[in-house]
Image (cartoon, rainbow, N blue to C red):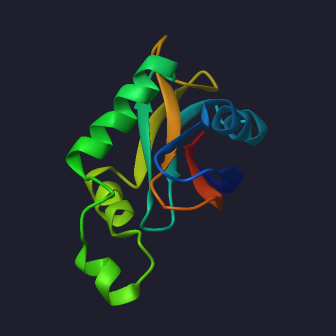
Amino acid sequence: MFVSTETISFGTEGFCHLVDITAMTQERVRQSGMSQGIAVVFVPGSTGGVLTIEFEDGLVQDFQRLMERLVPRDIPYEHDRRWGDGNGFSHIRAALMSASAVVPVVGGRLALGTWQQLLFVDFDNRKRQRTVVVQLLGE
């Protein structure tokens, strides 16, 4: 059994900024030499998430509007009262998402659909430097 743990780092803008991490994740798979197995992509932190969706401008805007309707940023949150950092909405949005995604690796490639990309979403209320953990398990 082969196990490799790598990281991907990048900057984000916050406020539901989506970053396509497909190519960076695929590069970690390629560098590992793994041909079959799974890639686990995990976000350490409580204001980010990982998802699969088509990375297309219209869907990005639709996703951002959905998050604003579900968890508006301009209403009071108890977290903000306690900590004064104004990112209570960020934590709630991240809680609705997953902190990880598992993607099969087949023939050395992520087994994503034609219009499916692997994305990181930053829900925080400021620019951040983010790191995602990619753990590869297979052969």
Number of numbered markers: 0
**Between 133 and 83, the one nearer to me in the picture:** 83
Left or right: where 18 falls relative to 26: left
**Between 73 and 128, the one nearer to me in the picture:** 73
**Can you see residue 81?**
yes
Q: Position of residue 79 (x, y in %)?
A: 30, 79
**Residue drawn at x 30%, y 45% as measured from the top left:** 68
Residue extending furthest toward the right: 31
**Residue drawn at x 70%, y 37% as measured from the top left:** 24
Q: Is residue 27 above or below residue 121?
A: above
Q: Position of residue 134 (x, y in %)?
A: 59, 51
**Residue drawn at x 25%, y 72% as measured from the top left:** 77
Residue extending furthest toward the top: 114
Left or right: where 10 falls relative to 105: right
**Residue drawn at x 39%, y 86% as measured from the top left:** 83
Q: Position of residue 100 (x, y in %)?
A: 42, 51
Q: Position of residue 70 (x, y in %)?
A: 21, 46
Q: Is residue 114 above or below residue 112?
A: above
